[in-house]
Image (cartoon, grey):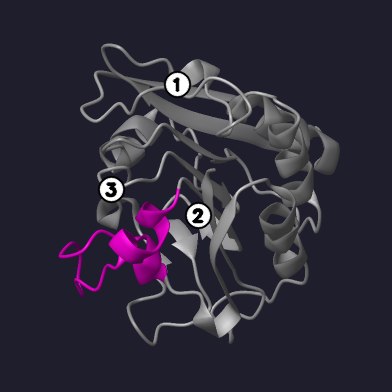
Amino acid sequence: MGTIGIEWANKYHGRASDLKNNDDNARGFYNTLSGVRRFEYGDDLAWDRDFEESGVGAPAAGTDQIYADDVDIVFFSGHGSRNGAFFGVTSYDDGEAKPSELKLGNRDCEWIVFDACLVLERDNLNVFSRLGAVFAGLHIMLGFDTTCGDSGDRGKKFAERLNSGWSVRDAWIRACVETEGSDTNWAYLRADAAGTDTFNDHWHGKGFVSADPVNPTARFYLRGAC
């Protein structure tokens, strides 16, 4: 069975506006998706270094090898920007999981969800240079091209579709359409290489899963109105 991890933040201690529903959102995903639950960290226990590559960045505090990159799918719910996922505390790093500090899939992670504003903003196609190097075996990154709402049930809806055998990308798109207005754009970025087919990825046990694009030769970005 596939392995699952989640992190979420509602309390931002003045770093950004507090949110209300990210615990319900992430836990809805965690408790609904069929698989092995590995970790949940929220608010002051949710840290950017859990997503970052060891030895990368300043400070070089990354521990993704035992958290985000040690599960098949990881789901973050909180604030974000084109500069990455934004956390409420800076006790163990700087509170921001920057694209330049991420390198996923060189251990395990196949899919990552940033249920947060703007992490996958197209930015005149700079999304490729900004996020492309994150893919080191990672199949698909899912999120938003625009700002998004503080949904309490998008994670559950996403998990329900995955359990029902929807492809990963279609399950995400549908969950976004059901929880956002047409002024919000869902988005995903995926990688492929010779012998891989991440376009047709499904959750483990629910359909086809591509081999890992360890050295990706192509990256594809798609966005659309909810």
Q: Which residue is mark 1?
A: 198
**Amino acid at circle 3:** Arg
Q: Is residue 51 magenta?
A: yes
Question: Badge 3, how many Cα within 10 Å: few under 14, some, many 20+?
Answer: some
> How far across and how far down the image is residue 130, in percent?
32, 41
Q: Secondary structure at mark 2?
A: strand
At x 40%, y 83%, the residue is: 90
- The spot of residue 216 in percent (x, y) is 26, 24
Compare marks 1 and 3 and give the one earlier in the sequence.
Answer: 3
Nearer to us of marks 3 and 2 is 3
**Is 30 rendered above or below residue 225?**
below
Which quadrant, please, contains the N terminus?
Answer: top right
Which residue was labeled with disc 3? 107
Q: Which residue is denoted by mark 2 in the rendering?
A: 81
Residue sitting at 45 percent across and 35 percent down?
Answer: 123
Mark yes or no: residue 21 visible.
Answer: yes
Q: How many marks?
A: 3
Left or right placement of residue 101 versus residue 80 in this view: left
Q: Closest to the observer: 41 or 184?
A: 41
Q: Earlier in the sequence, mark 3 or mark 2?
A: 2
Q: Is residue 78 left or right of residue 179?
A: left
Kind of residue at badge 2: Ser
Residue type, label 1: Thr
Specify the quadrant of the image occupied by residue 30.
bottom right
